[in-house]
Image: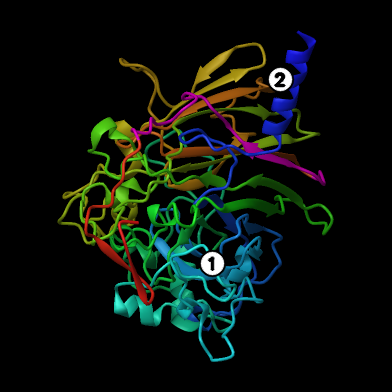
Amino acid sequence: MKKITALVALALLAIAGTGYAVTCAQDNVPAATLLVPYFRVGGAGIVGTGSSMGDIPDTSGTDTLVAVTNVSAANIIIHVTLWNKYSAPVLDFNVPMTPYDVVFWSMRDILNGKLIVNPTYQKLSSAGVDPCGQTGVASAAYALTKYLRFSAVDLSDRTRAISVYQTPAFSGTFRQNVWTSLDESGDITSWTSTGSVGSGVIDADNYACGSAAGNIVNGDFSGYVTIDVVNFCTLYFPNDQRYYGEEIIATTGWNTATNGWTPNVLMGDVFYKDQKPGDTSANMGNISGDPAVHLEFDSRLPWNALAANNNLTFYNRYVFADPTTGGYAFPGDGREPLGKSYGFRYMQTGATTSLRTWAIVYRSDIYPGDSSLEYPDTTALCSWWLYRVGISDPSVYSAVGFTDAIHRPNVIVFDNDENTVNVTGCPSPCGVTPGNIPLETQRLVITPNVPIVPSSFLGGWISMTLPGYFEDQAWVGVQHSGLGLAISVGHSATLLSGQFICNPSPFVTFAQPGITVQTGTAVQTNY
């Protein structure tokens, strides 16, 4: 018996030294896509107006720091996309990474056009060639100067996509458009009413959502970031069908018997530097960190929500209705989804100590749409924004965005003694006014916030469910701190909606006999 126990212990030690991925479970293992569910950059102190505005200065103390690590022996390219709070893509750039490489950046620097985040390799070769033109081969032998899995079919994308940028990479009107697409952001306190359009929810002009170019830059900047392993540099945003139909995003082509590579090679982390209101001392800033959300690729995840098992993937809303393969082996993304129900503790004490809690809430979905709108896209909240700022005709379309019944959240607040308040939803019939968590990404004030947490609840926990047309597309993180405290804590909320958020179908191969794909100067069949 003792001998068997010792063997079991040795086996457990061996397992403990290795990270094993479990598809459709939220686990912190190497992934093919990283989600930074929220970023915040302080917007105070910008000098000038319109396209002549100067850089975003480091005066407010609010910034977000992102790090990405390639844990594999392969050369890779990552495609970084900034999205606004209405889920419209705003800015993207390509970064080459060598084996075991680390890159990190400040989101303030990115918004100021500093896109060289890996200076050792984001540079031209001795022959003047951008790393985006240094084509890799479909074999195990990846030379250190080659990054591409294969070349883009789209000649325009192939010849124009770069990874070596000027500093700043953009200025003038382009920078103005980026800033107006991400600004006028702030913490959301009033999220128990569907009519809430307060500070941080609706901005005056948003170029990415289809408004005319404006020059109103006010308040902080916020949004979220996706970081994908891709087969080659690209100019396309992930909301473009070509991102999947032309196999820009890395999928099954990396997982072959000949080379053994997989696109699950990234780990990442996020740090939030946050100068709390009232903290005027330079030494009183708070910082919290958390791993990025790691989304694994698995070829068993159907790319189409209408397919057998009705499985979802992270980018499903952009590919679910289009079966076009473009001649490639895998027409979708194969990234695991997120979740919909989360639980987390909150802290609330007296006014003198001011312990407090925020929740970062990310959710994505498709929304009610109308083809007559100026911006009919149902994969973003831009049509809702257009209606709220009066650009869309209210008589044509009003029930948009997260304000419809299917997106109604259910938030239940418990104190430490099991007393409870149902904040935003309840079973039918319901006597409580339904609420709304309005944006794709936001930071909610949990405490102190009397409409949400009664002042008599000095501690407890919250159950938050965020449903939608596509289930399991939400994530919740938590931040705890206190005014004047030099340290704070951030962590992911606990997933309550089950151990597994999807059920991979039996292993399938998407390649068809006779299909060939371009891999630089060679071709590869049925990879």
Q: How crowded is mark 1: few (under 14 residues within 10 Å), some or many (20 or more)?
A: few
Which mark is drawn over residue 8?
Answer: 2
Q: Where is residue 486 in the image (x, y as percent from the top left)?
A: 82, 47
Query: What residue do we see at 65% from left, 24% from top?
Result: 455
Does residue 337 show up?
Answer: yes
Residue topped by disc 1: 141
Which residue is outermost to the bottom? 127
> Relative to the observer, which residue lies in front, 340 or 214?
340
Magenta-highlighted residues: 484-506
Q: Is residue 238 above or below residue 120?
A: above
| Measured Cα–Cα span from mark 2 to mark 1 | 38 Å
Crowding near the residue tagged with mark 2, few <14, some 14–19, many ≥20 C-alpha atoms within 10 Å: few
> Residue 513: image x %, image y %?
22, 54
Kind of residue indicated by mark 1: Ala
Placement of 269 over or under 311, stated as above or below: below
Q: Is residue 491 magenta?
A: yes
Q: Nearer the viewer, residue 524 or 202?
A: 524
Local secondary structure at mark 2: helix
Which image quadrant is residue 430 in? top left
What x and y, as percent, mark residue 130? Answer: 51, 82
Q: What residue type is labelled 2?
A: Val
Closest to the observer: 514 or 447? 514
Q: Is mark 1 on a helix, strand or loop?
A: loop
